[in-house]
Image (cartoon, helix red, strand yellow):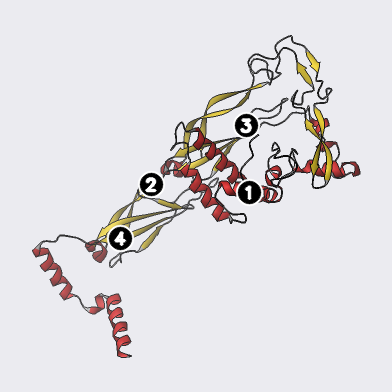
């Protein structure tokens, strides 16, 4: 098994990075290696999967705390690590709790049958989660959309019904675990040599060996396939958020439930709108005359066009608010707002007659009509008079 890279290294961070730094690094790396930008590039796909895995741990305070203390062994029950206990984890332990079970199991409270691999080896086990991604348009994120996507996961074998054996086949007791479904192993840890139990690798925890395995799943009871599903993306989803689809991950073992599908959402940028949380921002250009005289203008929103009255004397850069014209809050019937900044466009390449009219207009203005300009020169005059 290849040694996993440090999750902080994967995201280009140092240990102790803030939540904002983790989120920013994830977005940057996810965009760089997104499968849509690298079709048929397995290396990019592997990096994207690695980035998602790192973010899933470091963005969760509980998982991150375990990872910082125990390394990969603290968050991945299937991680074996290197020999001994190097690399920050306890190599070979399926669960950090197994260490404490082995030490305190005989004294009550910490161990007991609830955590015994021997007693639970044949019990139903939940399937693993599957990570995927989808890219949607800005307006699709605002309004919600249904997307067809393909998911590669483990499914229950339809030929043997998940038993792993052909019809009328016989089974024999596994010689590796003597039918227990688990084996006892010794591991060297910081606490010394500790004995613990593991699911038997030969029979997969079933305790029995199928003499005539199913030809379709080769005796595992599951096989990998690609399934077309329809993903319901709710209105209000934001870039970088993850949708969890229950039951669309890998099929369980021994009749266990299916895992979930985790879909990382990437939202394409919009040519007019930007988004911050549930608020929408945009700019609209207006003419000099509209700014001076006021006018009714048409403003685009994510819900359609609305009319807004620009008051007389509006300054360039003025921002006004349209309540309830933003993005829907997830799981709620309320909306953010839209903020519109007006930009006064200065005309270019005027004719001689237009310039004369504009000069005549400018000469006719009194100082009280240009308060900011008047105040500026008064302050400037006072400044130089003091010197």
Tag 2–tag 1 contact (CB < 8 Å): no
Tag 3–tag 2 contact (CB < 8 Å): no
Residue 231 picture location, percent across and down:
52, 33
Identify the residue under disc 1. 60
Please tell me which residue is depicted at 12% across the width and 66% down the height of the picture.
355
Question: In this view, which residue lies farthest toward the bottom?
Answer: 386
Q: Is residue 65 above or below residue 160?
A: below
Q: Which mark is residue 247?
A: 3
User: How far apart in space, not on screen, are marks 2 and 1 (Cα)?
Assistant: 30 Å
User: The C terminus lies in which quarter of the figure?
Assistant: bottom left
Q: Is residue 43 above or below residue 359?
A: above
Q: Which mark is residue 270?
A: 2
Dot 2 or dot 1, earlier in sequence: 1
Residue 40 picture location, percent across and down:
46, 31
Secondary structure under tag 2 reads loop
Q: Nearer the viewer, mark 2 or mark 1?
A: 1
Please tell me which residue is depicted at 46% across the width and 49% down the height of the picture.
327
Identify the residue under disc 4. 343
Say how many tags the image has.
Answer: 4
Residue 59 in sight: no
């Amino acid at each position: 098994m290849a040694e996993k890279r440090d999750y902080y290294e994967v995201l280009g961070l140092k240990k102790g990075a803030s939540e904002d730094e983790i989120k920013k690094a994830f977005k940057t790396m996810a965009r760089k290696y997104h499968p849509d930008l690298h079709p048929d590039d397995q290396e990019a796909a592997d990096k994207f999967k690695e980035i998602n895995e790192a973010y899933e741990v470091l963005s969760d305070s509980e998982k991150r705390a375990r990872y910082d203390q125990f390394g990969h062994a603290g968050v991945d029950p299937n991680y074996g690590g290197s020999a001994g206990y190097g690399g920050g984890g306890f190599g070979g332990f399926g669960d950090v709790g197994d260490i404490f079970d082995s030490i305190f199991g005989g004294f009550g409270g910490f161990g007991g049958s609830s955590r015994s691999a021997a007693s639970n080896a044949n019990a139903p086990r939940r399937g693993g989660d599957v990570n995927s991604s989808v890219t949607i348009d800005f307006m699709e994120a605002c309004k919600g959309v249904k997307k067809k996507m393909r998911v590669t996961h483990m499914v229950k074998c339809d030929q043997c019904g998940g038993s792993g054996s052909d019809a009328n086949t016989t089974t024999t007791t596994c010689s590796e675990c003597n039918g227990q479904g688990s084996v006892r192993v010794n591991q060297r840890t910081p606490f010394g040599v500790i004995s613990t139990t593991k699911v038997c690798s030969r029979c997969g925890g079933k305790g029995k060996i199928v003499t005539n395995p199913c030809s379709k799943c080769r005796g595992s009871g599951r096989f990998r396939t690609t399934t077309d599903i329809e993903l319901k993306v709710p209105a209000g989803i934001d870039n970088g958020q993850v949708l969890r689809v229950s039951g669309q991950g890998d099929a369980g073992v021994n009749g266990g439930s299916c895992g979930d599908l985790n879909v990382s959402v990437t939202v394409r940028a919009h040519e007019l709108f930007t988004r911050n949380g549930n608020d929408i921002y945009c700019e609209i250009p207006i003419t000099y005359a509209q700014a001076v005289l006021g006018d009714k203008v048409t403003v685009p929103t994510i819900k359609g066009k609305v009319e807004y009255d620009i008051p007389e004397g509006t300054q360039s850069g003025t921002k006004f608010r349209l309540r309830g014209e933003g993005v829907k809050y997830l799981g709620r019937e309320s909306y953010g707002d839209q903020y519109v900044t007006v930009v006064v466009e200065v005309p270019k390449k005027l004719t001689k007659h237009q310039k004369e009219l504009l000069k005549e207009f400018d000469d006719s203005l009194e100082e009280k009509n240009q308060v900011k300009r008047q105040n500026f020169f008064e302050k400037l005059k006072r400044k130089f008079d003091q010197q």
